[in-house]
Image (cartoon, grey):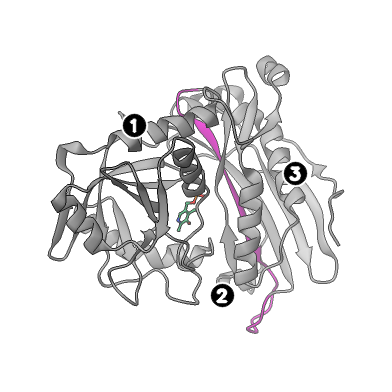
């Protein structure tokens, strides 16, 4: 049964004073502070989705036998709410996050949530916490929906009780002091995904597995880690939490195809569309480290970047690894990289035209302006 008419019970509370909130919004950083409210919706095998609530942000009761704590049945999403110059608040392609959450849910044997309920839940939280959507340059409200199995049962099977939650955290510009190209480390010891695994699902387990390789990257002076397909050690999958693009000297963009190991990024998809709109060819296919190395040597690959909701586009300067150092030098960040970044953030923040109907208005201009 599709529950499109589930009503949210609201228990509103202002956790922090206006002055405290404003102090946080001046320099929120990323993931450090949380808003006044959160969403909780319960699912049980027998009753489906019920008990939809807007609650004061705070700890959730959890039984120590809760399945998520033992077998890691957890998935999540990430999207942002933006305040436009007219005061309105919008989210970016929330329906795509809903569909992806359900793709992840199927792989992790968690219940799917109706797309309209997911979007209504985001809207309910952003409306309750509209005062937390910052208006400074490149600032946004980061939204973190997640779904956990919380049946108290140690047997190994899919849980028959789950809980969907959304929390929100104000976010400042990802790059303070201008966009800086990063160096990335080619993981040689560890993989993030293999054929038939969970690489295409946005699950906490994939992130847990990426933390050690991320530490290895940092020890080698790199900010991010790049994973290749464990079967070839040459075919590029993606970074720990971002998709990868290479740019050829003729303006063609090349990105690994969705091979079942990588996440179907919404930023990736949006950039493919924007590049094609400009007349660039975009190839979704197998991409290898060898192609990157030889392309840079021969001058046929001129830019590289990573993309995801949190940082939008991160220009890449170099790819390092054991016996490997591919470096664009001073040519990074590339021109196309930066102009795509500007176009996408322009749409999100309301400076550019939303040709594809990607924006979802949560708080209309008239209401937003009076807050
Ligand atoms: C979330 C995520 C991305 C980026 O997806 P967006 O929808 O663009 O934010 C890329 N790779 C992984 C592994 C991710 O978890």
Residue 109 image point, x, y percent: 65, 73
Q: CA distance from mark 3 to mark 1?
A: 33 Å
Specify few, some or many for label 1: CA neighbours under 10 Å numbering under 14, 14-19, or 20 or more: few
| Dot label at residue 305 | none
| Dot label at residue 176 | 1
* Residue 214 vs residue 268, the one in the foreground: 268
Q: Which residue is mark 3?
A: 120
Magenta extent: 136-158
Q: Secondary structure at mark 1?
A: loop
Does 288 sit above or below residue 175?
below
Q: Secondary structure at mark 3?
A: helix
* Residue 287 vs residue 151, the one in the foreground: 287
Q: Which residue is mark 2?
A: 70
Specify few, some or many for label 3: CA neighbours under 10 Å numbering under 14, 14-19, or 20 or more: some
Does 141 sit above or below residue 110?
above
Q: CA distance from mark 2 to mark 3?
A: 31 Å
Q: Is residue 151 magenta?
A: yes
Q: Is residue 73 left or right of residue 316?
A: right
Does 242 sit above or below residue 302?
below
Q: CA distance from mark 2 to mark 1?
A: 38 Å
Specify few, some or many for label 2: CA neighbours under 10 Å numbering under 14, 14-19, or 20 or more: few
Does 231 sit above or below residue 360?
below
* Residue 80 vs residue 12, the one in the foreground: 80
């Amino acid at each position: 049964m599709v529950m499109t008419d589930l009503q949210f019970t609201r228990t509103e509370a202002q956790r922090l004073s206006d002055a405290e909130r404003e102090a946080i919004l001046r320099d929120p950083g990323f993931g450090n502070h949380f808003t006044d409210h959160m969403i909780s919706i319960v699912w049980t095998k027998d009753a489906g989705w019920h008990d939809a609530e807007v609650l004061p942000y705070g700890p959730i009761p959890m039984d120590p036998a809760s399945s998520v704590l033992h077998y890691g049945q957890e998935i999540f999403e990430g999207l942002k709410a933006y305040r436009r110059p007219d005061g309105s608040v919008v989210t970016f392609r929330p329906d795509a996050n809903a569909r992806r959450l359900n793709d992840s849910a199927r792989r992790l044997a968690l219940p799917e949530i109706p797309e309209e309920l997911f979007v209504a839940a985001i809207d309910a939280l952003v409306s309750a916490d509209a005062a937390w959507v910052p208006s400074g340059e490149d600032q946004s409200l980061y939204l973190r929906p997640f779904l956990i199995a919380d049946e108290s049962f140690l047997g190994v099977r899919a849980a028959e009780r789950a809980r969907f939650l959304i929390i929100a955290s104000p976010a400042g510009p990802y790059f303070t002091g201008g966009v800086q190209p990063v160096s990335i480390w080619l993981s040689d010891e560890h993989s993030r995904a293999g054929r038939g695994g969970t690489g295409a699902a946005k699950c906490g387990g994939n992130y847990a597995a990426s933390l050690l390789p991320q530490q290895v990257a940092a020890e080698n002076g790199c900010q991010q880690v790049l994973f290749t397909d464990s079967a070839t050690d040459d075919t590029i999958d993606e970074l720990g939490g971002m998709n990868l693009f290479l740019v050829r000297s003729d303006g063609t963009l090349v990105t690994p195809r969705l091979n079942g190991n990588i996440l179907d990024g919404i930023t990736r998809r949006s950039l493919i569309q924007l590049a094609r709109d400009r007349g660039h060819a975009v190839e979704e296919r197998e991409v290898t480290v060898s192609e990157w190395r030889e392309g840079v040597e021969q001058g046929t690959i001129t830019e590289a970047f990573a993309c995801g909701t949190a940082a939008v586009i991160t220009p890449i300067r170099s790819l390092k690894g054991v016996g490997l150092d591919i470096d664009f030098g001073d040519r990074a960040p590339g021109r196309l990289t930066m102009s795509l970044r500007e176009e996408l953030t322009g749409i999100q923040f309301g400076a550019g035209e939303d040709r594809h109907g990607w924006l979802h208005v949560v708080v209309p201009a008239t209401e937003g302006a009076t807050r």
